[in-house]
Amino acid sequence: MATSSEEGAVTKYVVIDSDSHVVETERTWQFMDAEDERYRPVLAPHPKDPHTQWWIINGQARGLRFPTLTEEEMEERSKQLGRNVVTPIGAREGDDVERRLRHMDRLGIDVQVMIHTLWTVPVTDRPEVELALCKSWNRWVAEMWRLGGGRLRWCAVPPLMSMDESIRSLEWAKEHGAVAVSMPPIIGQKLLIDPYFHPLYREAERLDMAIAVHIGNGNEEIVALTQPAYDVDSFGLMRFRLVTAGACERLIESRLPLKFPKLRWAFIEAGSMWLPWMIHEAKRRMAQRRKPLPDDVLKAFNIFVTCQNNDELTYTYPFGPDNIVIGSDYGHYDGSSQMDATLIMRQRTDIDEQVKRKILCDNAKRLWEL
């Protein structure tokens, strides 16, 4: 456990990484039911780049697949980015849980909350395929939780096209280490606030599980529209981060959290710099409609947001002192990734020790009910 000094006394607290990943491999689908084997995804290699592969699902290249880099290649990527993005292959792909735990020890992390990689973009438009993939993925990650001795918690992936199956899946997931339900900011033609999802929220609230809205995009048209062009990076602001901030804004203005007062919501990997602007705009518009929002709307609505170390926290933190957490984006190596994010947070001098403890421990414990 981490230690810190407060008013001369040494205190200990659990450090929680609220955004870590597992990168799917062919082993992910070994947990499929026998009758679902026909839906098993396969990896197809890029004809020119040996690092790049695509998931072929139902005859189409779907979902997100990070290129597999060696640790040496990730070291080089770290030098280019100026941030530590190195993770052992077996640790990020779930094949070596012990190695992941040892790496967490070196990073000063006591508990990680694991999120998928695949569902960052649309995976399939067939409910039966989605159900088969979700069942196998959840079983795969539940095995990591079992081997991890409680240090690897996770966000369940529900088959959202089959609401009855989604609801049925949550109790099993909760019993096997899941702390949240993973959802993209946009799901096909539906927003998070769509009444279609209300039964899922009701069950998550009953089970004391959070709703984890990780950056991503479940709308095929928007994903296609924001394809890389003019040498723009594919993981751009418009495709993932803006829709995540927008989903939070719609949630607040809809007042949906008041319908599910015990349900917790997490908006993950979009940073926190958008919070002041979004909250200001939401309050202004709701005041014009004579439906004023609470002063501390994040706390009142049980909404949590992950920050990054390149955020100006003296600007964003006052908007959510009890609702800001941090994640490393463990296993990925994009604009959000920083494997030693919790260590860097502890070294920051622009915020005091009490704030650090809240971000690293207290707020995250409340979010994930750890």
Image (cartoon, rainbow, N blue to C red):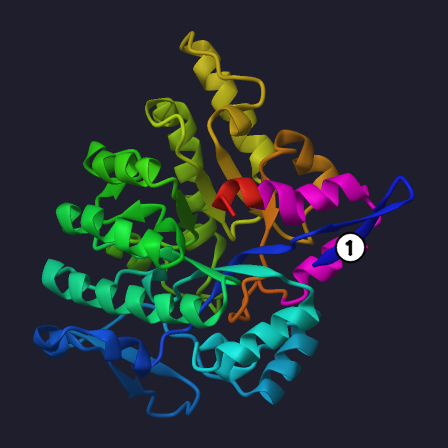
The three-letter amino acid code for the residue at tag 1 is Thr
Q: Secondary structure at mark 1?
A: strand
Residue 77: image location, x then y, percent:
62, 78
x 42%, y 92%: residue: 50
Residue 339, placed above or below residue 303: below
Place of residue 248 in the rendered image (x, y in percent of width and height, measured from the top left): 43, 36
Q: Which part of the image, by quadrant, shows the N terminus? A: bottom right
- Which residue occupies the extreme right position in the image? 8
Q: Of 47 and 232, which appears nearest the observer?
A: 47
Image quadrant assignment for residue 139: bottom left
Q: Which residue is mark 1?
A: 3
Q: Residue at x 18, y 62 (%)?
A: 130
Q: Is residue 149 placed above or below 70 in the rendered structure?
A: above
Most frequent secondary structure within the magenta stretch? helix
At label 1, counting other C-alpha atoms closer than 10 Å, the crowd grade (few under 14, some 14-19, many 20 or more) is some
Residue depicted at x 31% and y 76%: 28
Give the image location of residue 110, x and y in percent: 62, 61
Q: Is residue 348 visible?
A: no
- Segment colored magenta: 339-364
